[in-house]
Amino acid sequence: MEMVLNHTSDQHPWFQESRSSRDNPRRDWYVWNDTDTRYRGVRIIFLDTETSNWARDPVSKSYYWHRFFSHQPDLNYDNPAVHEEMWSVMQFWLEMGVDGFRLDAVPYLVEREGTSCENLPETHAVLKDFRKRLDQHFPGRMLLAEANQWPADLRPYFGEGDEFHMAFHFPVMPRMFMSVKLEDRKPIMDILQQTPNIPDPCQWCLFLRNHDELTLEMVTDIERDYMYDTYAGDKAMRLNLGIRRRLAPLLDNDRRRVELMNGMLMSLPGTPIIYYGDEIGMGDNIHLGDRNGVRTPMQWDGGWNAGFSKADPENLYSPLILDPVYGYPAVNVYSQGRSGHSLLAWMKRLMATRKSTQVFGRGSIEFLHPANHRVLAYVRQFKNETVLVVNNLSSSAQAVELDLRRYKGNILVEMFGRNIFPRIGDLPYLLTMGPYQFFWFRLRRI
Amino acid sequence: MSVGEVDLLVSVPTHNSAQTVGETVQRIRMGLLKYFPRERAVILNADAGSKDGTREVIAAAASNDLQRSANLYALRTLPCISTVYGDSPETNVALRTVLAAADLLHAKACAVVSPDSTSITPDWIERLLRPVYRENFDLVTPVYRRHKFDGLLLRNLIYPMTRALYAKRVREPYALEFAFSERFCGHLLENQIWDHESRGLAAEMRMTITAMAGGFRLYQTFLGTKPHVDRTGADLVAALRQTVGTLFWSLEANFQYWNATGVPESVPSCGAEYDLTTEPIRVNRKRLYQLFNSGVAELEPVLRSILSPQTLAEVQSIAKLAEDDFRYPHELWVRTAYEFASSYHRSVINRDHIIQALAPLYRGKVYTFLLENRDASGPEVEADVEDLCLTFERLKPYLLDVWNARE
């Protein structure tokens, strides 16, 4: 379950009470100040809409702190009552049976003067306390961190296995798109080689797209410019420091690239997360405000409101996608369910193949360095199982020679068709690959 | 070659260049990362079987982490490939290797950089490649700031004569740094200009002349100061064979072109104008004078078969002048050069002997240049070179006369 720890709506009763008077018992549940001069220099996240992290409240005639929209005031975790109340909320849902929480915007819980107000030790202390209570009262449940940070800054969110169970790996996502556009493995290898080891029971979460913009905060300026120019030529596609588009439109609805990206998502270290609708290649609507263009109703079928709601279409919270390429009559679960070659059917096969081995979930990764930089190749290993993954990132056919001498004597079994490829010998292992093709090989000594 | 298609190719031909090539490759990488961060690029080392670890130095330089040291960020892989084309340096073969690689990789712009260019900066890469890659020029040649007594052969013969005949003011027709387009590369390969007959000629100069005569778009780019190289012990005849031999050789193939050219036109350029430095350097003038005199005396039978009686007589007459009074006038020098070109065309004697016979006369001309410009400022030296150029242009009909007469 999604849980927002950092802030509430300004319509929330807590905030309404807090703003009502400086003497209200809930006054200190939010971060108030008489001026907007505290915490100077802290970055603004929603650059397109906000000019400050402070907003003046006309009711209480003072300023409140908000790292996101001004209608989303930050809770004050220096107040123990807030800490306790938020645990109560978590407890409520845990008792309802949820298996875990995706905790939203966790780097920003606590503010301190003279800092970036992100990733502070006090914030980690709050999170560790929640984890401790979770383990004590609800063993087997889990916490997933949403913290858009560099891998080295994310590492502390795992603690010593006593903070988050999982964390989204934000920086790898834009680099996967970059690698495919550049036809070069460098961006992916660079970021994964910078990624620190995490405690054994912990896991990264990988994703291609989510409900937010394709964030470009964790890239360099030159990379951001490149991404904007190549993936968001139309300014309407850009939002804050990111690109508000779904997977299929980002990849020009190119089935081969969609498959390659999902193939990498499923084979790189981490737990893959698929954003709803991307499994059928849903489109987006860049003319809707904020990130609403990627939050349109799920397209279940070609009927009334795409099978999403029985309401009058005019009453839908978000309009349906109607264009001829991505519209719900053309792209929907029902129709793809009827074809064994649909993207949905292919995604199911991909997931089934991934699940056929533990190596993708728990295995180590070792990159190979073939001379052809358009090919990304790595070996995943777990216990006595070894899988070789080879991805052609380019739009043209490629030949690649892999140094597999340490696996000499093994045969390669292609995991989707279970076909046997030649045995590994002393010579470099030659593979030829079609445009955007990828292979998963199980290594077997027979 | 597993690099695949590229936008830019920068080549470094080497032979036992371990001492300097590492720094050169680093600067090339910095230039590519700084000025062409998005482009698909490759560095190609064409090596003549170096035995001093040149290729290892290049591999080490190519894998250095530049990003931290130079505040640069590489968006994509910048491969650096070494290939051995033979076991001794041969510019023709090296350049053909580069052209073949550029063609194979569909490089849109290709630059060649000398491994000995210790003065190279990352800007060079931009200045060489940009005119080709972004402005559709076909050949970019360099312009350097030189010492007033550096590039003597260039100033006294190659530049003025090339300019007069091919009607393009290309300051360095024989350059070790240059860039060319995919279109020009295709033309060179298609016309097989590196055939057997051209062995021993300066491949770089053939390129420039081919571009001038072929109507390709030329550009000159300023690459800063050219460090003076002391060539006291260098083989002058070998240098003449390569450069003057190339120029003479090209005149036959391009007769229709240079026969019809008019007033030399300037070539688009960027950066500073041609400039001179005047720090003192030591030149042994006396020896030049002696070699001129002994050459004219010893080679009289050979010179008689090459030069017209009048020109030979004038040459012999200046050989009698005392050291301080010696002058090889521009007009006599131009007639000498043109008659040598004509004799080369006619093969009046073995062509190699013709080139060898030019050496003492060239020394006499250089002696005059050094003497007359001993105290000259940069602009005064330039004025002298310009005067020589105009003499070559004015006497072009004389070349046509002797060329046709001997035909």
Image (cartoon, coloured by chain):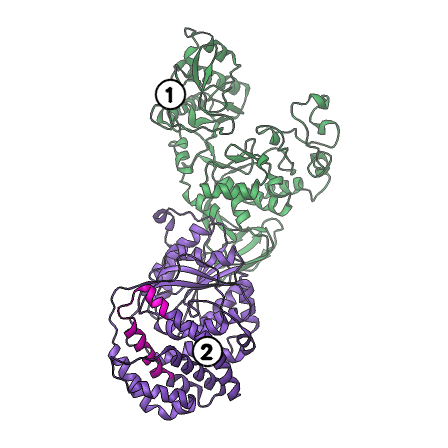
Chain colours: A green, B purple
Q: Identify the image quadrant of residue A115.
A: top left
Residue B369, given in percent of the width and then of the height, sits at: 32, 74
> From where the camera sits, is residue A47 visible?
yes
> From where the camera sits, is residue B203 visible?
no
Residue A333, given in percent of the width and then of the height, sits at: 69, 35
Residue A159, magenta (yes or no) = no
Front one among A238 and A9 = A238
Tag 1 residue? A37
**A115, above or below A233, in the image:** above
Q: Amino acid at mark 1?
A: Thr
Mark 1 neighbour class, 10 Å CA radius: few under 14, some 14 to 19, many 20 or more: few
In the rendered structure, which segment of residues is drawn in magenta? B358-384
Residue B383, magenta (yes or no) = yes
Tag 2 residue? B395
Q: Residue at x 42, y 50 (%)?
A: B34
Tag 1's secondary structure?
loop
Q: Residue furthest right?
A: A303
Q: Residue furthest bottom?
A: B301
Tag 2's secondary structure?
loop
Q: Amino acid at mark 2?
A: Leu
Asked if marks 2 and 1 fall on the same chain, the answer is: no
Q: Identify the image quadrant of residue A306.
A: top right
Front one among A395 and A37 = A37
**In the displayed structure image, the side of residue B110 where residue A329 appears, left or right:** right
Mark 2 falls within which chain? Answer: B
**A81, above or below B133, in the image:** above
Mark 2 neighbour class, 10 Å CA radius: few under 14, some 14 to 19, many 20 or more: some
Task: Please state the total of marks drawn on the protein image.
Answer: 2
Which labelled disc corresponds to residue B376? none
Residue B141, given in percent of the width and then of the height, sits at: 45, 64
